[in-house]
Amino acid sequence: MKFIKTLFSSVFWLLLAGLFAVCLAIAGAAIYFIPGLPDVRQLQSYELQTPLRIYTSDDKLIGEFGDERRMPVDFDEIPPQLIQALLAAEDASYFDHQGVDPKGLARAAVELGATGSIQSGGSTITMQVARNYLLTLDRTYVRKIREILLSLQMERILSKEKIFELYVNKIFLGHRSYGIAAAAKVYYDRELSELSLAEMAMIAGLPKAPSAFNPLTNAERALIRRNWILFRMRELGHIDQAEYEEAVQEPVTAKRHQVQLEVDADYVAEMARQFAVTRFGKERAYTGGYNIHTTLDSRLQPMAQRALANGLIAYDTRHGWRGVEEEDIPRSLAEAQDRTERRGLEEELDESPEVIETARRAAERSETEIDGVDGDVSNWLQVLERTPQLGPLYPAIVVENNGREMRVMIHDGQLLTLDWQALSWARPYRSARSRGASPNNAADIAKPGDLVRVMQRDDESWRLSQLPDAQGSLVVLEPQTGAILALQAGFDFNASKFNRATQALRQSGSIFKPFIYLAGLNSGEMTPASVINDAPIVLRDGSRNLWKPSNSSRDFLGPTRLRVALARSRNLVTIRLLQSLGLSETIDFLGDFGFDKSRLPNGLSLALGSASLTPLEMTQGYAILANGGFRVTPWFIERVTQGEDHNLVEEANPEVACRSCPEGQETVDIDGKSYRIAPRVADEGAVYLLRDMLREVVERGTARGALPLNREDIVGKTGTTNGQRDTWFAGFNNDLAVTVWVGKDDNSSTAEYGAQAALPIWVDFMGQALEGKPESMPERPSSIITRRVDAATGRLLREGQGGGIQELFRADFLPSTQPVRVNKTIEEESSSQGTGTYEAIF
């Protein structure tokens, strides 16, 4: 007996000591952390700010970032059943505890110790508000202690209703919706008061995992989560049995309702977002009500997007069918639910087997039939709803094959029939250079239940397509200012957010050659008539190996004028030209064009475009050629304003080209605004000569594919790198400088040349952009004169000498004169010395 009393006494004092130690620890933590906690009172006047909005130069919306889908609501505007659904899902004892739920924390601690993870949460709604508004999201014990202390403070200062109001307006609920009112709009396009009980429970299920329990992307999992919440509401007495039975059987009704942008320019919108975050900080950028007005032209941008997308699809079609995007998709939501992954649903499924049973019945009640298709296709419609359209490519599910016809379903259950003309191109892809045998019938291409892509032709018929394997970039600059007028940096931003216009360092190939030629023309050492030998050359590459460059055609023309060499893109002539000019001098000249000299190879391969540059950098170089030699810098932020009144925050002041301004003038007025004049980096006459030589590329060289535009004012250059990894076309007139790049992100071969892959895209864009516009060419500088030269030697012909061709020159840099050719036989027969020339006789 004495032993038992002693034992109980010892246990009592041990527990008392433990409790005292815990109290001391809590008090110590409070003393340590409270002085550094944020001020909870700031939540009393917390205002949800307006989002960051991005516009074209003519105020067409191209992007919204931050909390743009937040629609704040007051507590008394929230339907009681939605409040009850959120409490059932997140914090059933919310109105009873003082900010912290000891049972919940203890349960979470036990789960963490037993399984290494927490299934049932542990954070109250108050703690979530503290975390979302006042703390970071770091998963640390220190943050958890701060969260608990803030919650206790918050409950003393704010009412339960105010805390709940803060919660429902801040939580992220998927698809860029913040807050319950925004979610109601995004998923159901209705006000909160118009939602059904089942829809309220669906929204209440999102805070735990906005992606995993999303009715658009994971409808089968969302159903289980929704019905568990309805089960909890019934158990807690919030709804009766009749309400419960009706709600758990309601089918999934969510659909995507997005903010409609006026112009598709996601890559530039993302560039503007990054600018705003750098300039204003992440929090202020997204909530400060800033409006960024870009330089984008709302007419040209859609043209750029379409031209690039269509060009990449055309390229991809030439190289074969790579197969379906997804196979064997279950027709019905019930079948999909049977196959769904149950991981992450432990809390919901452990509650009661009733949850999975009611979810299955709801899935069965989601049964959807459409005319022309046998059976339930509810899951097919869900898959099509959640699969985004990419460029002009719509997701489609194969319904049936009938010989050489394929029936497919697209969004909203619309059925399309693809004839053999729409399918026959789909020879299996083997490599960039080979394809398999032609298909014999539609079943060789795809089977029912497979996800494919289709696109509409200009004649409104449909054809089979696929997401292109190649990528591309199209950049448009205004030559006089450097303003970015259009930029498409990939097939579709939603397929790949990598900005190939500004981030992809790719070898430039032959589109870099004009700058080597300009270096020669600018120096005065070369003219368009200068002759350089197009013959084999062997050089040491800095190691024991020898470099033996060749022309793409593998032939040699011998002595060749520069005009001809550029038009035919002769590699060996360009190498010898760079060799004669001097490598370091040429690199210095190129640096003035804005090219990063640290990325220019210190070797003669520079002549062939071995420098890795971005499409934007190349477009800048061509813009300088287009404006007559002024170094303009690309820019895209026109002005930044704030608030609905668009109060000016800052405004761009770029350097501009001014051909008519006298040397030494520093500023020029344009439309009532003063601009700095950009520095001249090349002689006006030399640039004019190069432009005239580039016209030869279009008329008789590698860019003859641009002739159908039937315009004299466009010039440009094709480019293809080793192994056909990069294909380019860069060209311009006075008003637009445009560069197109086509290649693969993994740097593998395209198996095509610039004239095949890139030039058609450029022609497509320029044909639209210049339609109905007069030709725009520079005036011929007074320093440029015309002289006849010998076609073989490039030397001037004397007055009276016959033959020859017309060529342009800078007046102060003329070639030497062609010597008089004397034929001794004619001189002897004429018995008159000095008359034995062909010119004298003929």
Image (cartoon, rainbow, N blue to C red):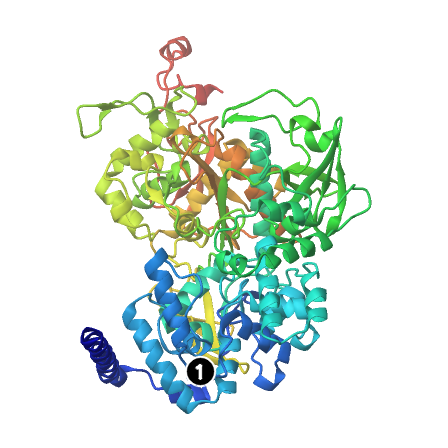
Residue 556 shown left or right of residue 476 in the figure = left
Compare residues 332 and 659 and report the one nearer the observer.
332
Answer yes or no: is residue 711 visible: yes
**For numbered disc 1, what is the local secondary structure?**
loop
* In the rendered image, the vertical position of residue 820 relative to residue 289, given as above or below: above
Q: Amino acid at mark 1?
A: His
Q: Residue at x 58, y 74 (%)?
A: 236
Q: Residue at x 67, y 32 (%)?
A: 447
All told, the count of numbered labels is: 1
The location of residue 741, given as percent across then percent down, is 47, 42
Image quarter where the N terminus lies is bottom left
Q: Answer few, some or many: residues within 10 Å of disc 1's Cα (few below 14, many 20 plus, some between 14 and 19).
A: some
The location of residue 80, given as percent across then percent down, is 63, 80
Compare residues 162 and 777 and report the one nearer the observer.
162
* In the rendered image, the vertical position of residue 830 relative to residue 553, given as above or below: above
Compare residues 361 and 165 and report the one nearer the observer.
361
The location of residue 484, given as percent across then percent down, is 48, 58
Answer yes or no: is residue 215 visible: no
Find disc 1 in the rendering and name its residue.
97
The location of residue 243, given as percent across then percent down, is 70, 70
Find residue 401 and report its image quarter.
Answer: top right
